[in-house]
Amino acid sequence: MSHFEEHAEGAGPFITRLTWKPAEDIIAVWESRPARKRGVLTFRTAGRREAESRSADAVALRRLGRLNTIAALAFTVGGALFALGAGVSQFGSDTGASATIYFVGGLFFNAGGYASFLQAVNSPRRNSATGALETPRWRWWSYEPVRIDWLSTFILFAGTLVFGINLLDSFLHGLSVKELNRLIWAPDMVGCFLFLASGHLALVEVCHGRPGLRVRDLGWWIVAINQLGSVLFLVAALAAFTRPATGSLVNVNIANWGTLTGALCFSVGGVLQFYERPDKP
């Protein structure tokens, strides 16, 4: 393999892992999620069996660490509040309290989605010539749809915003059945599909192609648990459709329990995310 020859892996236009030789006796491996979440590259030197991790600079590691903490805390609290809101809806009678809890939980989901997006926007970039991760200037926004981590986190953040529309509209009173389905149920469904699309891309990213099992990979567990939560949210949304003929939900119990269990998945994923962080600089 020549000095700049590279081997790329991924799916479609997306590259999730690159292997190249920055020097004659060194093989370097860049992976999208570890570089974004932990700020590391992997190096293997000829004659040595064990791989070595090399980190980005201290600025990048502190930046990624802060964003990871914000996102993990936001999804942990947001998921817990959604679960509480679903519990109040299932076992209580105060729909106003449930709507308020959902709305506050949605704000935490917004924060977690945006922090995840910022982590992708500001992740260290590899230098194939030097074999190092370089820290870009701080940005609040970018447009990089050919990067799978950017696209996955952007869709996730968009999904949290769409859920926000659903949660705001839930405070409206005196809505007809048609208005309930258009203003509350339809945004809920859109948000669910955006979460599912984001989760699928995240699985492709962590699996470097077709989704599969990576039971020894913490990142895989986080993504898989969150994707299960997205599926449960979709089940809950389908059950929350208001029948025009009766004015009642398809199944209120499934709607509440699906929301509760799906929210707990995101809360567990948030807790696990605390451990997927850069080493201290």
Image: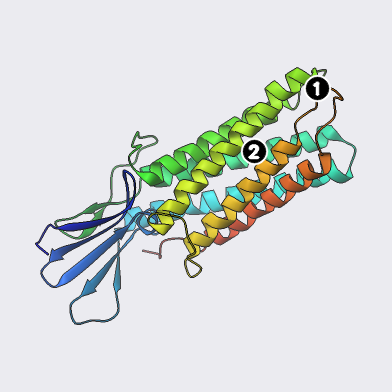
74 vs 223, nearest the viewer:
223
Where disc 1 sits, the SS reads loop
Quadrant of the rendering where the N terminus is positioned: bottom left
Residue 280 appears anywhere in the view: yes
The image shows residue 239 at horizontal and vertical percentages of 75, 38
Q: Is residue 274 left or right of residue 165?
A: left
Mark number displayed over residue 224: none
Question: Label 2 belongs to which residue?
Answer: 106
Residue that carries the numbered disc 1 in the rendered image:
244
Give the side of residue 154 with respect to residue 127, left or right.
Answer: right
What is the quadrant of residue 24 in the picture?
A: bottom left
Farthest right residue in view: 93
Horizontal and vertical percent position of residue 238: 71, 37
Task: Give the quadrant of the C terminus.
Answer: bottom left
Lower position in the chain sequence, tag 1 or tag 2: 2
Query: Identity of the amino acid at label 2?
Result: Gly
Residue at x 38%, y 45% (from the top left corner): 148
Figure colour scheme: rainbow
As drawn, 27 above or below 69:
below
Residue 114 image position (x, y, % from top left): 49, 40
